[in-house]
Amino acid sequence: ELKVEQNPLFLSMQEGKNYTIYCNYSTTSDRLYWYRQDPGKSLESLFVLLSNGAVKQEGRLMASLDTKARLSTLHITAAVHDLSATYFCAVDGLSSGSARQLTFGSGTQLTVLP
Amino acid sequence: KAGVTQTPRYLIKTRGQQVTLSCSPISGHRSVSWYQQTPGQGLQFLFEYFSETQRNKGNFPGRFSGRQFSNSRSEMNVSTLELGDSALYLCASSRQGGVDGYTFGSGTRLTVV
């Protein structure tokens, strides 16, 4: 059974600081996704990482994937208040044949303080 | 382009009733999957449909069922509602294999009283 562990679960950081969210998973997978969720809202896709060594950047966020270490990171650079949200990683695992399903981490609730 | 459309947005039902939720995927996406989000259990996979066939099902009781129509629209049904079924139900659409990622709808918030 695929398990996805995210840490930290809660993160308060000051504006302008840098930080990294970690996502570890337990079995082989080559597809990992990062999502953002604002309170009461749905999941907004941030990054799609499809191969070992993949690195993607959008604004102040950068995500990477190391399939050998079964680890993805979401790095936040010079945080601003608008980044306050809950961030989820999700691993796409093959369950049988071509049927895939996402297994989500518990989420990291990020609060950026002025 | 139009996103994933879920209806209704909010529902209040009584224990023992049944409910049907609808999801229209992005045009051209043939895979629709459903997820339940609760504060206690987080985001959990319910089932996935592709070309009207259920290919995968999560660890939920048989009260949870679904189907997909020839136009890729999907419905999920929950019978004999329990208080614990109160949750945000999200559907996601993708091209086959999720290579382009999964796009989520706005969700249906179900409250069982």
Image (cartoon, coloured by chain):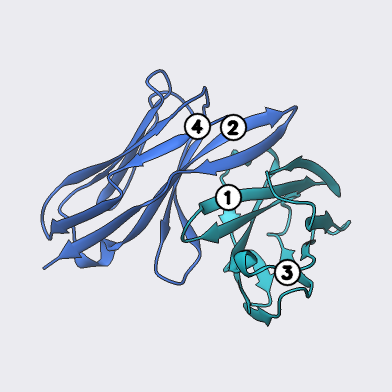
Chain colours: A blue, B cyan
Q: Chain of mark 1?
A: B
**Towards the viewer: A52 or A106:** A106
Image point (80%, 66%), residue name = B79
> What residue would you read off at disc 4?
A50
Residue found 74% across the figure and 51% down from its top:
B61
Nearest to N terminus: mark 2 or mark 4: 4
Q: Residue, x 50% and y 32% (percent of image)?
A: A50
Point out which mark residue B44 bears.
1
Task: Inspect this view and state whether residue A102 appears.
Answer: yes
Helix, strand or loop for disc 2 = strand
**Circles 4, 1 touching at the beta carbon (< 8 Å):** no
Relative to A107, B25 lies left or right:
right
Residue A13, how many percent across, how many down?
15, 56
**Relative image position of residue B43 (x, y in whole percent):** 53, 52
Q: Are marks 4 and 3 on the same chain?
A: no
Q: Are marks 4 and 1 on the same chain?
A: no
Question: In the rendered view, does A69 fall on the left or right side of A30?
Answer: left
Q: Give how far apart the Cα atoms at labels 2 and 1 are.
A: 14 Å
Q: Amino acid at mark 2?
A: Gly
Q: Nearer the viewer, mark 4 or mark 1?
A: 1
Q: Quadrant of residue B56?
A: top right
* Residue A65 at least partly seen: no
Residue A47 x/y as whole percent: 43, 45
Which chain is home to disc 2? Answer: A
Residue on which the image places disc 2: A93
Give the residue number, with chain letter if any, for mark 3. Answer: B81
Q: Amino acid at mark 3?
A: Leu
**Of marks 2 and 4, the one in the foreground:** 2
Label 4–label 3 contact, CB within 8 A: no
Same subunit: marks 2 and 1: no
Q: Is residue B76 left or right of residue A69?
A: right
